[in-house]
């Protein structure tokens, strides 16, 4: 096949892979997820499926029910998790972590309205919580409210300038808005912060493709393949550009 046909198939393959494997917007920080899960003795998983332990003493009755809710959430028992977070909030209506974690569970369950309400409550109680802004922005982005998502990601980055999830999510929003250079810049910042961010490489590859920078797109795919050599379907299409 000629180069144009090959490029068209490559682009479709990349978009399909990303939509099937990277469709979930990120709700929280990658490095915190690994550290907090290791505290509980739980193997680190995909960051968007992880739930955070707030960095505070968990000795109050509300905190204990909150922690039980985290255990249920990590084992996929979302209804039980929500029930425990509800109990925590009945005990202490001002317990911000329970609002935040219940919002994450609602987001995972696809209940976007309740998720946004809970993230908003968490922010009202703890305005400096960058993760809550990232999480609310992720739900806004998932539901097509891109301007609202940008506002949240911008606020998260003003509170936490090194927040990788905020950069990746904002980069994807810019990509959806056809702001390709902004997308490339944000995803590049995520990669500079963590060179192992496969999702950032793949999203930036799409941004480069959309901007007509074909070679840069292939470079990002090659770098992603360094971390996941068997990643389909990109291995089938990157051949002609597999070496410099």
Image: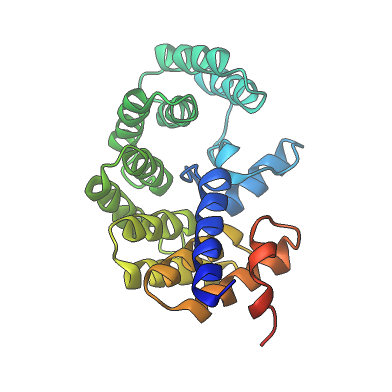
Point 72% across, 69% down: residue: 226
Nearer the observer, 95 or 30? 30
Q: Quadrant of residue 65?
A: top right
Residue 114 in the figure: left or right of residue 203:
left
Point 58% across, 29% down: residue: 58
Nearer the observer, 186 or 214? 214
- Residue ranking furthest to the front: 1
For the N terminus, the image quarter is bottom right
Could you say where residue 70 lies in the image, as x and y percent from the top left?
59, 26
Could you say where residue 223 lies in the image, as x and y percent from the top left?
64, 72
Q: Is residue 34 above or below residue 196?
A: above
For the C terminus, the image quarter is bottom right
Q: Is residue 72 above or below residue 120?
A: above
Could you say where residue 151 lies in the image, as x and y percent from the top left?
25, 51
Q: Quadrant of residue 126?
A: top left
Could you say where residue 31 lies in the image, as x and y percent from the top left?
60, 54
Residue 127 in the figure: left or right of residue 164:
left
- Residue ranking furthest to the left: 147
Point 30% across, 33% down: residue: 120
């Amino acid at each position: 096949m000629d180069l144009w046909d090959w490029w068209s198939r490559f682009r479709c393959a990349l978009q399909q892979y990303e939509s099937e494997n990277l469709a979930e917007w990120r709700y929280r920080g990658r490095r915190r997820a690994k550290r907090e899960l290791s505290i509980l003795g739980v193997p680190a998983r995909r960051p968007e499926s992880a739930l955070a332990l707030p960095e505070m003493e968990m000795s109050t009755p509300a905190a204990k029910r909150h922690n039980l809710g985290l255990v249920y959430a990590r084992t996929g028992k979302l209804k039980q998790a929500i029930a425990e977070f509800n109990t925590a909030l009945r005990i202490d209506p001002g317990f911000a972590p329970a609002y935040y974690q219940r919002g994450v569970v609602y987001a995972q369950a696809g209940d976007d309205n309740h998720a946004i309400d809970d993230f908003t409550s968490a922010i009202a109680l703890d305005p400096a919580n960058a993760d809550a802004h990232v999480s609310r922005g992720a739900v806004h982005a998932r539901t097509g409210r891109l301007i609202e998502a940008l506002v949240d990601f911008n606020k998260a980055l003003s509170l936490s300038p090194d927040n990788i999830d905020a950069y990746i999510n904002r980069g994807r929003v810019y990509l959806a808005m056809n702001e390709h250079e902004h997308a490339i810049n944000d995803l590049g910042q995520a990669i500079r912060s963590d060179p192992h961010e496969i999702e950032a490489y793949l999203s930036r590859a799409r941004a480069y493709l959309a901007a007509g920078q074909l070679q840069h797109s292939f470079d990002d795919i090659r770098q992603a393949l360094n971390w996941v050599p068997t990643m389909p379907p990109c291995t089938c299409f990157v051949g002609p550009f597999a070496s410099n």
